Amino acid sequence: MKFLVPIDGSESSRRAVEHVIRLARRGDPPEIHLLNVRGQVDAWEVRRFLSDAEIAKMQIHEGEEEIRANCALIESAGLAYQVKVMAGPVAETIARYADEQGCDIIIMGTHGRGGLSKLLMGSVAGEVVEKANVPVTLVK
């Protein structure tokens, strides 16, 4: 079984990782993919001072930071996993990655890190449900 777990650094995404760990303990070891998708940076204020390469490097670093705590959870459970940081339209990128990797299911948190991002993650979760070709489990 291949699980895709989109990670945004929120408490909700951590709970999604804990859910995958519980599922993994019930059967054969799964293939776990942790994915962090960074929205595209289009702001002229940023692009005026940073090159595309600098923006990409910054996004990869930020994505890896958001995933790090979840990696520790999975490692402590003795499970193998893969990590990927990508940039692009978040819901579309998650759905496309699931297809490309042959994932059987997407397990993700329902909300991001609060405030406006909480509303946005809720809408991202809904978009992933619409766009994905595999089942999506939302963890509250």
Image: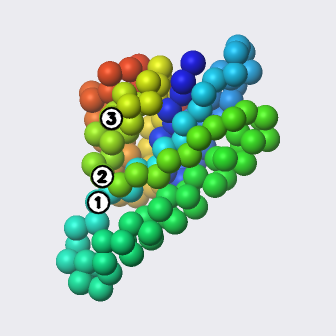
Asked whether the beta carbons under mark 2 and mark 1 sit within 8 Å of each other, the answer is yes
Q: Give me the residue at 45% from left, 70% from top.
A: 58
Q: Nearer the viewer, residue 66 or 52?
A: 52
Of pointers 2 and 1, the one earlier in the residue sequence: 1
| Left or right, 42 with reference to 75 | left
Residue 122 horizontal/vertical position (percent): 36, 41
Identify the image quadrant of residue 96: top left
| Left or right, 2 with reference to 114 | right
User: In the image, what residue type sits under mark 3?
Assistant: Arg
The residue identified by callout 1 is: 40
Up the image or down, 120 lies above or below 92; here it is below
Residue 68 horizontal/vertical position (percent): 63, 55
User: In the image, what residue type sits under mark 2?
Assistant: Gly
User: In the image, what residue type sits under mark 1?
Assistant: Gln
Label of residue 88 in the image: 2
Q: Give me the residue at 29% from left, 60% from top.
A: 40
Using a 10 Å C-alpha cutoff, classify the residue at mark 2 as few (fewer than 14 neighbours), some (14 to 19) or many (20 or more). Answer: few
Label of residue 96 in the image: 3
Q: Nearer the viewer, residue 77 or 138?
A: 77
Q: Give me the residue at 59% from left, 41% from top.
A: 82
Residue 3 horizontal/vertical position (percent): 54, 27
Using a 10 Å C-alpha cutoff, classify the residue at mark 3 as few (fewer than 14 neighbours), some (14 to 19) or many (20 or more). Answer: some
Using a 10 Å C-alpha cutoff, classify the residue at mark 1 as few (fewer than 14 neighbours), some (14 to 19) or many (20 or more). Answer: some
Q: Does any portion of residue 39 appear in the rendered image?
A: yes
Determine the CA span between mark 3 and mark 1. Answer: 16 Å
Element on which disc 3 rests: helix
Identify the image quadrant of residue 54: bottom left
Element on which disc 2 rests: loop
Residue, far bottom: 49
Element on which disc 1 rests: loop
Identify the image quadrant of residue 27: top right
